[in-house]
Amino acid sequence: MILCADRTVPVSFIKKLRKTEGQLNFPLVLECKVFGTTPVDISWYKDNMEIFHGEKYRLSFDNVTASITIVQTQTSDCGNYTCKASNKAGKDTCSAPVTIIEIPTAIPPEEEEEEEELEEPSEESTLQTKSVVTETESLTSRMATEPAIFQNKLRDVSQKAGDVAVFTCSFSGTSNISVVWLRQNMELENSHKYNIINKETSATLEIANVRKSDEGSYQCRIQNHLAQDFCFATLSVTGAYIFFYSYLSLLHLKHFVTP
């Protein structure tokens, strides 16, 4: 049997944008997937104004997955986002609203001042007390004024399909730093798919048996009572699974010639 595969397949979205809520001052990723004969042209719009790749936005397209990353969100990023896809045979669009919220950082309560009346100390006692207080304040200041900040940020990873992909980063700051891993703005947890190893000054994310569907942007967020920081990187899978898309192509063929 001979298949005549000369028909151009109109582009269409097989995974559309969805309503998304992002956190102020953090990256935000929007993603959708298309199917159709290549080449496919992709363009992005916010409130009907076209968006271009640059410092504010990072655009990516691998002939299947189209994504846009808002590097650091602001309240002005709220709005309706649209992805338009086109090829020689047709075009398609999908849209979704984005809202940006601000999550307040916890601030430790101030210590209440003592109101008890004390006897007036001597001059010598006052000088000694001031010296001790100054040294204590200096030590406390050094211990309590180190904001959470990345020392080595995530790097993009390219991994062969079926293998384990590893993201790692290191950071510093006052202790009790919380670490959160996210993909497409959804928090990741330990499972058969993800192995998360968070230590005092480093964090590692292992992704088992990577597939084409695992591609995209991954993000690590750290926070203590003084500050928060973030970094993100992209996973690409080589030797990707193309059977699914080859099968879809066959479904679009109309002509079959049997000897």
Image: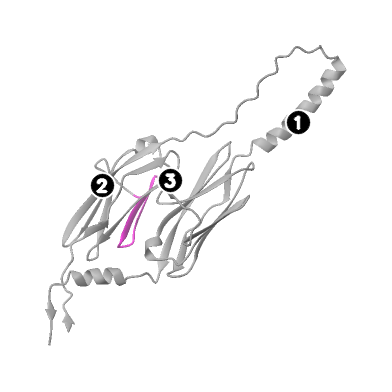
Q: SS of the residue at dot 1?
A: helix
Q: Residue at x 69, y 36 (%)?
A: 142
Q: Residue at x 22, y 51 (%)?
A: 93
On screen, residue 186 versus residue 63, left or right, reads right
> Pointer 2: what residue?
95
Q: Position of residue 21 (x, y in %)?
A: 37, 42
Asked if the residues shown at circle 2 and circle 3 are in contact, with their CB atoms under 8 angstroms apart, the answer is no
Amino acid under disc 1: Thr
Q: Is residue 55 magenta?
A: yes
Q: Is residue 221 above or below residue 139?
A: below
> Pointer 3: what residue?
27
> Pointer 1: what residue?
136
- The number of numbered badges drawn on the structure is 3
Q: Residue at x 54, y 52 (%)?
A: 153
Q: SS of the residue at dot 2?
A: strand
Residue range highlighted in magenta = 53-68
C-alpha separation, residue under disc 1 versus residue under disc 3: 39 Å
The answer to which of marks 2 and 3 sits earlier in the sequence is 3
Q: Quadrant of residue 107?
A: top right
The answer to which of marks 1 and 3 sits earlier in the sequence is 3
